[in-house]
Amino acid sequence: MTALDPRQRAWVEVSPRAIEANARAVCGHLKPTTTLMAVVKADGYGHGAETVARAALRGGAGSLGVATLTEGLELRRAGLEVPILLLGNLTDAEQLRTCLHWRLMPTLSTAEDIHLCQALSTDSGRRFSVQLKMDTGMARLGCAWENGAELVELIRSQDSLELCGVYSHLACADGYPDGDDGAFTQLQHQRFNSVLDQLPEKGRDVCCHLANSAGTLQSQALHHDMVRVGLALYGEAPATHLANTLSLQPALSLKARITLVRTIPAGVSASYGRRFVSQRPTRLAVVAIGYADGVVRALSGRIDVLHRGQRLSQVGAITMDQLLVDATDAPDVHPGDIVTLLGRDGEHTISPGDWSERCDSIPWEILCGFKRRLPRVEI
Ligand SMILES: Cc1ncc(COP(=O)(O)O)c(C=O)c1O
């Protein structure tokens, strides 16, 4: 192994093929007139935005969604020419001017946004493609849905603006909080539809979109003209009841090396806080990954790692750069060996959902939590 080998310590393996296959599977599930926007914000949910974007486009996605201006610029600078929607809100004229220059579509929520974009567009002599967001139940971005039709008309009356989309976002299509019976999603859908029904014919040629992964997997009625899919592209189901809707392949594995193996006698404590005390002579393997890499400390003592198809329990507090596993029953564990923290090894698979259930989180947060320190290795 050379000093520059990314597999020296701990790393994330990403399979562009899995992402491409997932995009293809999602496209195959859509209504024939619906297109796929691949949501690649937060560095492609930790997988690497450019890699994910290219794979998803190969799999049939037609556009990309990002959260921030910087994320959009990175993709443009990487040479991606497809439509890119900024899902976050921009706050000043300079940011919007940059959007216009790089053909990134901003999300607009207010009449002030609309007038500002019209002014910038007139100044530059270029048409500005924008999208209007309506709040149907997130109380986050977007105009009140009751004002949606009015703002659509306002945008359409600006000679330099091109309204490319009207959208909203579902708050609990994934069933969180547990037990949501879909009534709120239905209410949001009704509100969204009621605005679309008010649009005059010329307002209908815009792309209307509502569904995230959960909405997409749940019902074709939510598909409209486009769906914005993140989590499912990465191979994770957004909810257990949707796990069998499509056959998705996890695109990410998390791996790390064992750097030391030692045996401690019975009755010895290990790691910070002495949470683990050996009940028997115990072979401890030190794994070179910790919470500074994204292995959440709240998972201490609650996860396993996979070594040559065998599960080993993680013990003691997860520390910043290292964690311990009990290798007493695995005599073939040696320094330099690789363990899988997330992903498949032999018969076993450990998913981001397995982790999130154990630390009061969600798979989205687990995937986005892997830090820059972990090299991304394409496989
Ligand atoms: C506005 C918007 N649309 C779509 C998505 C994709 O969601 P998911 O990853 O659940 O598919 C997100 C992600 O948070 C989002 O913020």
Image (tube, rainbow, N blue to C red):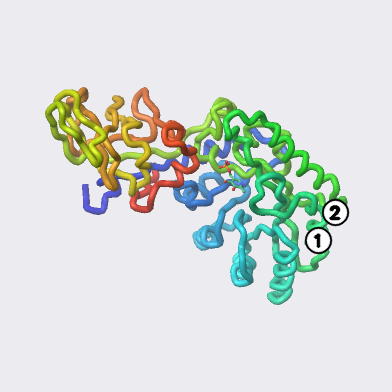
Residue 172: x and y, percent?
62, 37
Residue occupying the point 35% across, 41% down = 297
Number of residues whose C-alpha sits closer than 10 Å to that of mark 2, classed few (under 14), some (14–19) or many (20 or more): few
**Can the viewer see residue 46 in this picture?**
yes
Between circles 1 and 2, the one closer to the viewer is: 1
258 vs 111: above or below: above
Residue occupying the point 63% across, 71% down = 93
Dot 2 falls on a residue whose secondary structure is helix
The residue under label 2 is: 202
Frontmost residue, 226 versus 313: 313
Number of residues whose C-alpha sits closer than 10 Å to that of mark 1, classed few (under 14), some (14–19) or many (20 or more): some
Frontmost residue, 203 versus 297: 297
Residue occupying the point 69% across, 54% down = 142
Dot 1 falls on a residue whose secondary structure is helix
Q: Is residue 212 left or right of residue 361?
A: right
Residue type (three-letter) at the residue carrying disc 2:
Lys
Residue occupying the point 30% across, 44% down = 290
Image quadrant of ligand 1 equals top right
The residue under label 1 is: 156
130 vs 268: above or below: below
Q: Quadrant of residue 28?
A: top right
Q: Is mark 1 within 8 Å of ligand 1?
A: no
Residue 378: x and y, percent?
39, 45
Residue type (three-letter) at the residue carrying disc 1:
Arg
